[in-house]
């Protein structure tokens, strides 16, 4: 079947077609605008409702967020902490059969959940109280200080009536007072104010219970892990044991992982989390690491982590008779201090070594000086020989194989990259004595530009001399003494005849 030839429409018809399509599109847009005007009010209301839902705290209350503080497990755990805190610290077996050991491991898990709940309640109070004082979260970045200010300030708009001297430093109090007097916020409703006060109370209770648990853990760490406690402190030891899930599990953690255990994360408003200080965990806040200069703290952290892993294994697997011996941990601390002090020392200055005394008896065959250099110049290879001895790398030889290795070719001569420079002729300077130099300067036969016809003589002083006349005298003397026409004459002075013959 033969294909029909494709024909193109004239340009005028194409332009008309495009114009008609644009007009049709504009008519359709007008129809859509008329339809949207009818439901515009409903659309604006829906948009406002969506924005209010975004900015609102989510329709939750403090009871919906603070679920840990209201749970039965949390109450039982705090009751067990109070019970065991009243007892004296005895030997704790790091096994699952010991109830107090399980309580210690569970306490660290509870501490992590308490921190998360405290963060959520603080964010909820911040969202609600931002309606009254939106700049407060930037002025008071600490969570607990922010909650104390909210609990003290409440719905008061006159900042002179609020005493914050026992909560914040004087400089921060002044900034908060000035900003609160000029803020654009509005007073909260009674329900919103009650929610903020309730949230502050929950956070204060969580902070108090957290201190109780940490005090109990610190009192038991000296019995459970004496070497680790002596090395890094009771609070850090309790955190490490709790994060690992037990002392034996912590003993299986390598030293490189101990440096990042408990790494602090920053919440970026729901968009993700990033590490505040990369490659640093709770061990970074040990006293040995903080005592080091800031430049050496990363190095000190690795040293503390390596020694802490050894101390944990001593505590986990040592016998009961040697378990409370902390001499090994003390040796670890001294070793770490010594290495840090060694790294802090300034580099040793280079010593100026004296030259060795000359060997007068045997003497050296190597000589130096002007005469030796002159002697070496006589046997120095010429530029032509130097170019012949050079070889190019990855270059086509262009001659018989083996000529290059046998030295039968001309090397870099007459090739690309080869340079031949003519040997410079050194003019030999003739030494002239001082007397001769003075005579040359006094003579009028000098050929330099300062020559003159004036001659200084010791008898007459300045004498005007004619160089051409001097040349004539020389030629006359030659004719007199060395001419072929002249006979033999004596050079001796002849006496002049007297008056009487």
Image (tube, helix red, strand yellow):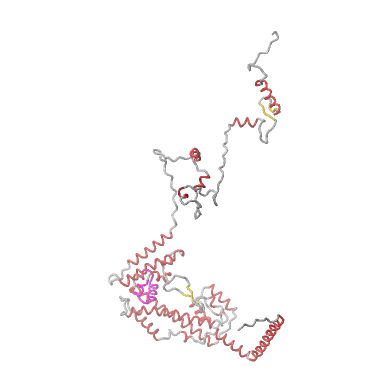
Q: Which residues are magenta?
A: 229-253
Residue 330 appears at what percent x and percent y? 35, 66
Reply above or below: 310 against 346. Answer: below
Taking 34 as reference, is 73 left or right? left
Residue 272 appears at what percent x and percent y? 49, 77
Reply above or below: 24 against 262. Answer: below
Q: Nearer the viewer, residue 399 or 234?
A: 399
The quadrant of the picture occupied by the C terminus is top right
Residue 143 appears at what percent x and percent y? 49, 77
Q: Which of the 4 quarters of the picture holds residue 469?
A: top right
Magenta stretch: helix, strand or loop mostly: helix
Inspect the magenta stretch and tell me whether residue 424 lies in it: no
Q: Nearer the viewer, residue 279 or 29?
A: 29
Residue with the most extreme right position = 12
Residue with the most extreme top position = 500
At 41% from the left and 86% from the top, the residue drawn is 71
């Amino acid at each position: 079947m033969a294909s029909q030839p494709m024909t193109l429409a004239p340009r005028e018809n194409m332009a008309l077609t495009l114009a008609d399509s644009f007009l049709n599109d504009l008519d359709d847009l007008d129809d859509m605008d008329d339809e949207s005007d009818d439901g515009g009010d409903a659309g604006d209301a829906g948009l406002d409702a969506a924005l209010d839902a975004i900015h609102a705290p989510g329709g939750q209350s403090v009871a919906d967020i603070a679920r840990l503080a209201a749970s039965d497990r949390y109450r039982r755990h705090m009751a067990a902490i109070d019970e065991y805190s009243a007892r004296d610290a005895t030997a704790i077996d790091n096994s699952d059969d010991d109830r107090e050991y399980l309580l210690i491991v569970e306490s660290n898990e509870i501490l992590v959940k308490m921190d998360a709940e405290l963060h959520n309640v603080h964010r909820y109070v911040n969202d609600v109280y931002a309606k009254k004082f939106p700049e407060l979260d930037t002025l008071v970045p600490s969570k607990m200080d922010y909650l104390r200010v909210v609990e003290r300030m409440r719905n008061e708009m006159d900042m002179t009536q609020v005493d914050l001297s026992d909560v914040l430093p004087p400089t921060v109090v002044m900034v908060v007072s000035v900003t609160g007097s000029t803020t654009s916020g509005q007073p909260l409703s009674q329900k919103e104010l009650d929610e903020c006060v309730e949230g502050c109370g929950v956070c204060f209770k969580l902070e108090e219970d957290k201190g109780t648990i940490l005090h109990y853990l610190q009192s038991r760490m000296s019995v459970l892990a004496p070497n680790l406690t002596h090395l890094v402190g009771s609070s850090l030891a309790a955190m490490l044991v709790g994060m690992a899930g037990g002392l034996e599990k912590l003993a299986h953690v390598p030293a490189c992982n101990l440096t990042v255990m408990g790494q602090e994360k920053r919440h970026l408003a729901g968009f993700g989390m990033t590490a505040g200080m990369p490659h640093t965990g709770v061990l970074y806040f040990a006293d040995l690491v903080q005592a080091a200069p800031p430049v050496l703290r990363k190095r000190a952290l690795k040293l503390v982590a390596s020694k802490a892993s050894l101390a944990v294994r001593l505590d986990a697997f040592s016998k009961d008779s040697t378990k409370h011996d902390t001499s090994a941990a003390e040796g670890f601390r001294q070793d770490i201090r010594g290495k840090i002090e060694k790294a802090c020392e300034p580099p040793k200055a280079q010593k100026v070594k004296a030259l060795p005394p000359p060997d007068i008896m045997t003497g050296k065959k190597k000589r130096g000086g002007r005469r030796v250099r002159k002697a070496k110049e006589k046997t120095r290879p010429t530029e032509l020989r130097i170019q012949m001895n050079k070889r190019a790398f990855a270059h086509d030889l262009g001659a018989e194989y083996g000529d290059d290795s046998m030295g039968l070719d001309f090397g870099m001569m007459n090739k690309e990259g080869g340079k031949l420079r003519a040997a410079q002729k050194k003019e030999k300077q003739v030494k002239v004595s001082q007397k001769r130099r003075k005579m040359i300067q006094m003579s009028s036969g000098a050929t330099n530009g300062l020559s003159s016809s004036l001659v200084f003589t010791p008898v007459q002083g300045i004498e005007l001399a004619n160089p051409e006349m001097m040349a004539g005298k020389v030629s006359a003397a030659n004719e007199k003494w060395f001419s072929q026409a002249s006979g033999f004459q004596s050079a001796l002075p002849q006496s002049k005849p007297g008056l009487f013959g």
